[in-house]
Image (cartoon, grey):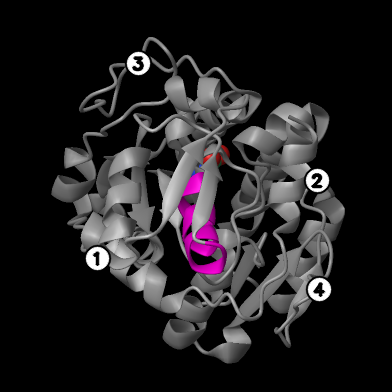
Amino acid sequence: MNKILVTGSSGQLGSDLVVALRQHYGMSNVIESGWRIPSHNRSLIYEVLDVTDRTQLQKLIEHYQIDTIYHLAGVLSAKGEQHPDRCWDVNINGLRNILEVAKAFKLQVFFPSSIAVFGPHTPKLNTPQITVEDPATLYGITKVAGELLCHYYAQRQVDVRSLRLPGIISYSAPPGGGTTDFAVEIFHAALQTGTYTCFVRPETRLPMMYISDAIRAILDIMQADAAAIKIRSSYNIAAVSFSVAELVAEIQKHLPHFTCDYAPDFRQAIADSWPSVIDDSKARADWGWQHQYNLAAIVEEMLAKVDVRSEEPGVERQEIGALR
Ligand code: SER
């Protein structure tokens, strides 16, 4: 039976993943956790957990008899540049604690890596599974090390599985300080004010994925036969790639008066260091990955589902903006 712990559960991925996990494995079998209780806490089973504290983590695993961890706690690319110590501590020491505990208690682990493992010398088009990894951000460095840690522990009987996620587009919870956040913010702005100031240039083209595809990818890789998971560092995974200008044009098909202007900040350099199109043929061949949402479908669903009535200005956005 699956008894699941989700770290960083109130973040952009966790908010939707927890719902899907509860549907699959039952309400009481999914324990949410985070470093603080979220203001909009909707969970009956939520534990405050600092993943850098191995003793606390171990107690929680024992208490709930956890057998699977979705380790989503992490500091993203833009925030990581502003809080480097925290980024290192959470992303490196937090992951190592998870893997050590997984080894001791024979747990299965999911670890989200990122396109941020790539850098300026990585081929930008059809980025291969195995290629140059020279990340330009501290976040990217922690994800490269994280992948190596996953591979290392997999050699020591830990069933750890990982995906190099692209920018995730979702409506339930805001993204938490990444470079791809513009692709979410733009929908809120389009519906709220009809105009958006984007922090990267219009020609910036990045790999992106709709949240439903991302959740399915995570569930699929975790449910696949262990023998099918041939890559134990992290799989390239992709859905769509589009430029900001193409995203704006697609939104304008629904909202013709929507306008976007551009004020690139430090996140432009981060975006420029990442690939545009990822080759995910290994994930497709090994465990049958297939995406469903293209740009048109993403835009249609986001415009229908983003709920601007209940919104206040995004805290994350203000925080990043203030430190530009
Ligand atoms: N969406 C992430 C970020 O922007 C990429 O892993 O940091």
Q: Nearer the viewer, residue 283 or 253?
A: 253
* Gap in angstroms between the C-alphas marked 4 and 2: 22 Å
> What predominant SS class does the magenta segment belong to?
helix
User: Which residue, as the protein is rendered here, is positioned at the far top?
Assistant: 121
Q: Amino acid at mark 2?
A: Thr
Instruction: Write down the quadrant of residue 27 in the picture.
Output: bottom right
Task: Write down the residue under mark 4.
Answer: 39
Q: Are marks 3 and 2 in contact (CB under 8 Å)?
A: no
Task: Write down the residue under mark 2.
Answer: 52
Q: Is residue 75 visible?
A: yes
Q: Which residues are magenta?
A: 182-193
Q: Secondary structure at mark 1?
A: helix
First along the sequence among labels 1 and 2: 2
* Gap in angstroms between the C-alphas marked 4 and 3: 40 Å
* Gap in angstroms between the C-alphas marked 1 and 3: 29 Å
Comparing labels 4 and 1, the label whose residue is closer to the camera: 1
